Image (cartoon, rainbow, N blue to C red):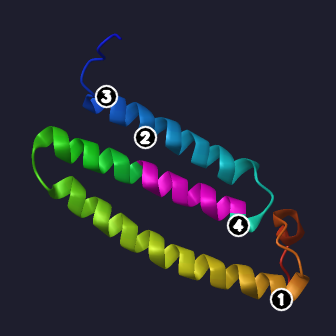
Amino acid sequence: MEQLGPITTQHYLALSALLFAVGAAGVLARRNFFSALMGLELMLNASNLAFVAFARARGDQAGQLAALFVIAVAAAEVCVGLALVIALFRRKETVDLDAYKELKG
């Protein structure tokens, strides 16, 4: 069996870019609120991976601290996002994003 080389910061950043692209495609292509929120969470996790990879490359803890703040913001975003989904579902009885293009009072 062939020995693979060490995993470098470029590997982590390539994975982070791939995860961010998948999340962005999920946000742009989905018609469901929950799928769009999952894509947004995937994008936030990709940024966390990049922060931690840079912290590892530099040898300090600043990137890990930034990732911790991103996790806190993501938790708050999920709470607010789900509250909005529930409120909008009660209004139109669907989670389809096309139904909410024009919201009128």
Q: Which residue is drawn at 41% across and 72% down?
A: 73
Do callouts 2 and 4 mark residues in contact (Cβ within 8 Å)? Answer: no
Q: Which amino acid does label 3 sit on?
A: Gln
- Residue identified by numbered label 4: 34
- Residue identified by numbered label 1: 90
Q: Which of marks 1 and 2 is nearer the N terminus?
A: 2
Q: Residue at x 76, y 53 (%)?
A: 30
- Residue identified by numbered label 3: 10
Question: Would you say 14 lies left or right of 83 here?
Answer: left
Q: Residue at x 51, y 44 (%)?
A: 20
Q: Where is residue 46 in the image (x, y as percent from the top left)?
A: 44, 48
What kind of secondary structure does the magenta stretch mostly adopt?
helix
Q: What whole-number distance in Å separates the C-alpha atoms at marks 2 and 4?
A: 22 Å
Q: In which quarter of the image is the C terminus?
A: bottom right
Q: Position of residue 21 (x, y in %)?
A: 56, 40
Q: Earlier in the sequence, mark 2 or mark 4?
A: 2
Q: What residue type is labelled 2?
A: Ser
Badge 1, how many Cα within 10 Å: few under 14, some, many 20+? Answer: few
Question: Would you say 73 lies left or right of 105 here?
Answer: left
Q: Which of marks 3 and 1 is nearer the N terminus?
A: 3
Q: Where is residue 96, by image quadrant?
A: bottom right
Q: What residue type is labelled 1?
A: Arg
Q: Give the range drawn in magenta.
A: 35-46
Q: What whole-number distance in Å separates the C-alpha atoms at marks 1 and 2?
A: 36 Å
Q: Residue 105: tell me if it is visible.
A: no
**Is 98 located above or below residue 85 in the figure?**
above
- Residue identified by numbered label 2: 16
**Is 42 located above or below residue 76 in the figure?**
above
Q: What whole-number distance in Å separates the C-alpha atoms at marks 3 and 4?
A: 31 Å
Q: What whole-number distance in Å separates the C-alpha atoms at marks 3 and 1?
A: 46 Å
Report if residue 39 lies within the magenta region: yes
Q: Where is residue 40 in the image (x, y as percent from the top left)?
A: 57, 58
